[in-house]
């Protein structure tokens, strides 16, 4: 069932990208043919037979996909060292990847908004959402932002200005992940313990340890 869902999602993105490029039915069928092809060699007779299209229809669709830069042709060597031309769909796949990345980013934002509202115990204002969006646009990942929120909750300061200062300070120190933050806190705790130990072991009478 899980694999079927993944397949449906992949097919959905494929169709959306095709629609975005205003493909004709013949162009879509040809693109789908290449997407399911093993060797990606353009054999016009084989394609026409498989898709039940004329050679002219196949060639027109192929030329149109090339003009739209949805497909391109790369020269590669086969197993016998012979140079053959193979169709490459990288441009089309990159478009699908961009759509998926954008969707994941939007889902990430929705998750962050829900977490903030839960911790704040109220609905976020439009200004609050703009500030959170600005953090994301500046490159702060979800993990870091939520960690800064937890820092604010721990210190009892539930406002975005404080969280912004926390993020600024972490960025200044070069923290890119929660592991970086945790490691820094561990090091600070070790230094504090070493300092406390040195104070306790100090020989105050003889002014030496």
Image (cartoon, rainbow, N blue to C red):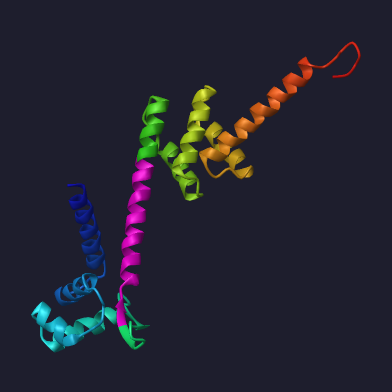
Q: Could you tell me residue 23's position as x and y percent? A: 21, 72
Q: Nearer the viewer, residue 141 or 40?
A: 40
- Horizontal side of 81 relative to 186 (left or right) equals left
- Name the one closer to the observer, 207 or 149: 207
Which residue is more in the foreground, 84 or 12?
84
Q: Is residue 41 left or right of residue 168?
A: left
Q: Measured from the top left, where is residue 131 in percent x and y?
A: 47, 41
Q: Main secondary structure of the magenta part?
A: helix
Which corner quadrant holds the C terminus? top right
User: In the rendering, at what x and y percent does residue 85 appear?
Assistant: 31, 85
Q: Residue furthest right?
A: 206
The answer to whether residue 12 is above or below residue 62 is: above
Whether 100 is among the magenta residues is: yes
Give me the residue at 10% from left, 86% from top. 54
Total number of numbered discs in the rendering: 0
State whether residue 118 is above or below residue 106: above
Q: Which residues are magenta?
A: 86-110
Please identify the quarter of the rendering in which residue 48 is found: bottom left
The residue at 52%/22% (across/down) is 156
Query: In this image, 63 relative to 195: left or right?
Result: left
Q: Vertical placement of 70 versus 7: above or below? A: below
Q: Residue furthest left?
A: 52
Q: Is residue 22 above or below residue 178?
A: below
Q: Judge left or right: residue 137 versus residue 72.
A: right
In magenta stretch: residue 88: yes
């Amino acid at each position: 069932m899980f694999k079927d869902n993944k397949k449906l999602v992949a097919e959905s993105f494929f169709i959306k990208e095709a629609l975005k490029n205003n493909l004709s039915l013949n162009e879509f069928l040809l693109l789908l043919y290449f997407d399911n092809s093993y060797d990606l060699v353009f054999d016009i007779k084989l394609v026409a037979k498989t898709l039940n299209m004329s050679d002219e229809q196949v060639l027109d669709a192929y030329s149109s996909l090339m003009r739209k830069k949805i497909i391109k042709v790369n020269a590669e060597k086969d197993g016998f060292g012979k140079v053959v031309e193979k169709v490459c769909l990288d441009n089309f796949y990159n478009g699908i990847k961009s759509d998926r990345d954008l969707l994941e980013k939007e889902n990430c934002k929705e998750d962050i908004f829900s977490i903030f509202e839960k911790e704040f115990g109220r609905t976020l204002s439009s200004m609050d959402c703009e500030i959170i969006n600005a953090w994301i646009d500046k490159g702060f990942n979800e993990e870091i932002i939520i960690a800064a929120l937890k820092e604010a909750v721990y210190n009892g300061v539930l406002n975005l200005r404080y969280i912004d200062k926390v993020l600024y300070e972490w960025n200044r120190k070069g923290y890119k992940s929660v592991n970086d933050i945790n490691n820094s806190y561990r090091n600070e705790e070790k230094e504090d313990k070493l300092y406390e130990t040195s104070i306790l072991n100090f020989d105050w009478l003889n002014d030496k340890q």
